[in-house]
Image: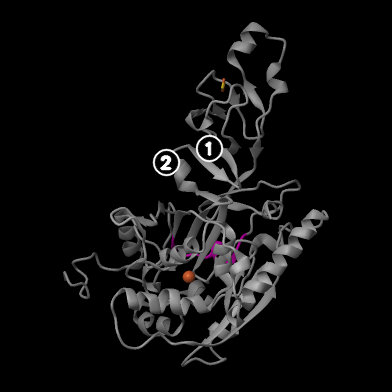
């Protein structure tokens, strides 16, 4: 499976993160690495351990070109070359020992406020330009969480429409102590494969085959992402027992706030455990997902499952994964690797409410028209993950034209 995943670019950090601190230790697909940005602006992803005598390069420092080891000063470049070995060059100036040592290095690219890494064989494919990366007038934020379980059970959740009714809607009601009615139940689900993954569709009580939840659906993006229209969630393998959740969230500003441009895409890390109780946090949508995934065990034991009709998408996805793994073993190209620059100018996806994301709506329209399209209300609070920093919340409210808390007529403080 690892060989298959290495055919795809993985988001591993935020661009703004390296602007704040130029080096970052990273564990990715079982490899310990260091991500850095040198003073010339080049990104590198190299072995965590210096090839000289194995010092931890995340304590090194960046120079105009490359990363300098803090132990004996050897200087490494993102292409894997050794540029300097200070004492060796004094003692044996003609030996050129540095030309005979290399460091493990992988390509890194910046796109959509994220830094992407490719750990596979050449030729290196393109970092996909998913359609939302080209949208204007949006407030984007990136949220990371480390989840202690295998990435695949998390990705199986990307093609599981029925869980939303129970894990999010009904469980939230139960957690809040609300009695009474349950949320609308699923009447019908459908799954289809397309070029970049699978779509899942649903009809809930009170909806019909004319609703976009059925006509368009949501995306399980190949091989390790959920795309709902307004946000992406990548499940990036740290190793077999740990997953980095990378969320990329787009909120369209109301027409009254245009033009809106973001100088810097903020990033933050969401905690997953309550320090007081030592229990998983259950208050936010993705936290609820995390509870389900870690609850399945570090690596879910599929031999103990009992799959039903709601799992048809999971079965389709598993089949495709096994087929693609075999394809890669035969030296063939797996699904959804993008190599054509023309195609990659904008990669269109099925998107519920595309018109809203592209053209926006006015504040006046928003409360009514947005409510009609699932997932698009003008959000006052960030519902997906716990722990949004105050400065990100304030920047969001400014972008959306929402009043500061306390001045908000709907706020209890107002
Ligand atoms: S261990 Fe890095 S320079 Fe010696
Ligand atoms: Fe979920």
Quadrant occupied by the C terminus: bottom left
At a point 49% along the width and 47% down the height, the residue shown is 15
Judge: label 2 CB < 8 Å from ligand 1. no
Q: Which residue is more in the foreground, 265 or 123?
A: 123
Q: Residues within 10 Å of mark 1 (few under 14, many from 20)?
A: many
Q: Which residue is more in the foreground, 249 or 58?
A: 58
Could you say where residue 231 lies in the image, as x and y percent from the top left? 50, 66
At a point 34% along the width and 55% down the height, the residue shown is 278
Q: Is residue 108 magenta?
A: no
Q: How many marks?
A: 2
Residue at the far top: name it: 91
Q: Which residue is more in the foreground, 173 or 210?
A: 173
Could you say where residue 29 lies in the image, as x and y percent from the top left? 61, 47
Disc 1 secondary structure class = strand
Residue 86's place in the image compared with 243, above or below, is above
Q: Along the horizontal axis of the image, is 310 left or right of 287?
A: right
Reading the image, the residue beneath label 1 is 36
Could you say where residue 394 lies in the image, as x and y percent from the top left? 30, 59
Residue at the far right: name it: 330
> Disc 1 and disc 2: Cα gap in Å?
11 Å
Question: In the rendered image, which quarter is residue 218 located in?
Answer: bottom right
Q: Is residue 377 visible?
A: no
Q: Which residue is more in the foreground, 195 or 198?
A: 198
Q: Are marks 1 and 2 in contact (CB under 8 Å)?
A: no
Question: In the rendered image, which quarter is residue 397 located in?
Answer: bottom left
Reading the image, the residue beneath label 2 is 20
Query: What's drawn in magenta, residue-wise?
Result: 129-140
Instruction: Decide which of tag 1 and tag 2 comes sooner along the chain.
Output: 2
Q: Is residue 209 visible?
A: yes
Residue at the far left: name it: 413
At a point 43% along the width and 56% down the height, the residue shown is 262
């Amino acid at each position: 499976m690892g060989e298959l995943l290495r055919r795809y670019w993985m988001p591993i950090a935020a661009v703004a993160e390296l602007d704040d601190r130029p080096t970052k230790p990273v564990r990715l697909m079982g490899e310990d690495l260091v991500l850095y940005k040198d003073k010339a602006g080049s990104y590198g992803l190299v072995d965590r351990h210096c090839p000289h005598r194995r010092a931890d390069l995340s304590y090194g420092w960046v120079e105009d070109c490359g990363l300098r080891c803090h132990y004996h000063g050897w200087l490494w470049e993102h292409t894997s070359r050794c540029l300097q070995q200070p004492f060796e060059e004094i003692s044996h100036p003609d030996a050129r020992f540095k030309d005979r040592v290399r460091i493990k290095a992988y390509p890194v690219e910046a796109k959509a406020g994220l830094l992407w890494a490719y750990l596979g064989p050449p030729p290196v494919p393109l970092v996909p330009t998913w359609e939302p990366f080209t949208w204007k007038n949006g407030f984007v934020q990136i949220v990371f969480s480390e989840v202690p379980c295998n990435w695949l059970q998390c990705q199986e959740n990307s093609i599981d429409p029925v869980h939303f009714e129970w894990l999010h809607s009904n469980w939230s009601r139960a957690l809040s102590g609300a009695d009474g009615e349950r949320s609308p139940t699923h009447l019908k689900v459908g799954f289809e494969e397309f070029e970049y993954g699978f779509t899942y569709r649903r009809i809930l009580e009170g909806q019909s085959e004319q609703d976009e939840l059925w006509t368009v659906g949501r995306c399980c993006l190949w091989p390790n992402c959920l795309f709902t229209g307004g946000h992406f969630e990548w499940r990036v393998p740290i190793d077999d027992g740990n997953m980095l959740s990378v969320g990329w969230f787009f909120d369209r500003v109301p027409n009254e706030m245009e033009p809106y441009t973001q100088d810097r895409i903020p990033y933050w890390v969401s905690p997953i455990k309550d320090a007081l109780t030592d229990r998983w946090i259950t208050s936010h949508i993705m936290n609820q997902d995390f509870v389900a995934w870690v609850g399945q065990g570090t690596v879910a034991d599929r031999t103990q499952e009992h799959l039903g009709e709601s799992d048809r998408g999971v079965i389709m996805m598993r089949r495709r994964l096994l087929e693609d793994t075999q394809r890669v073993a035969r030296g063939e190209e797996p699904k959804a690797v993008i190599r054509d620059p023309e195609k990659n100018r904008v990669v269109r996806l099925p998107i519920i409410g595309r018109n809203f994301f592209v053209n926006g709506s006015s504040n006046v329209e928003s409360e009514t028209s947005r409510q009609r399209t699932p997932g698009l209300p003008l959000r006052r609070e960030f519902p997906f993950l716990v722990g949004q920093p105050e400065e990100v919340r304030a920047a969001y409210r400014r972008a959306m034209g929402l009043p500061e808390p306390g001045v908000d007529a709907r706020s209890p403080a107002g």
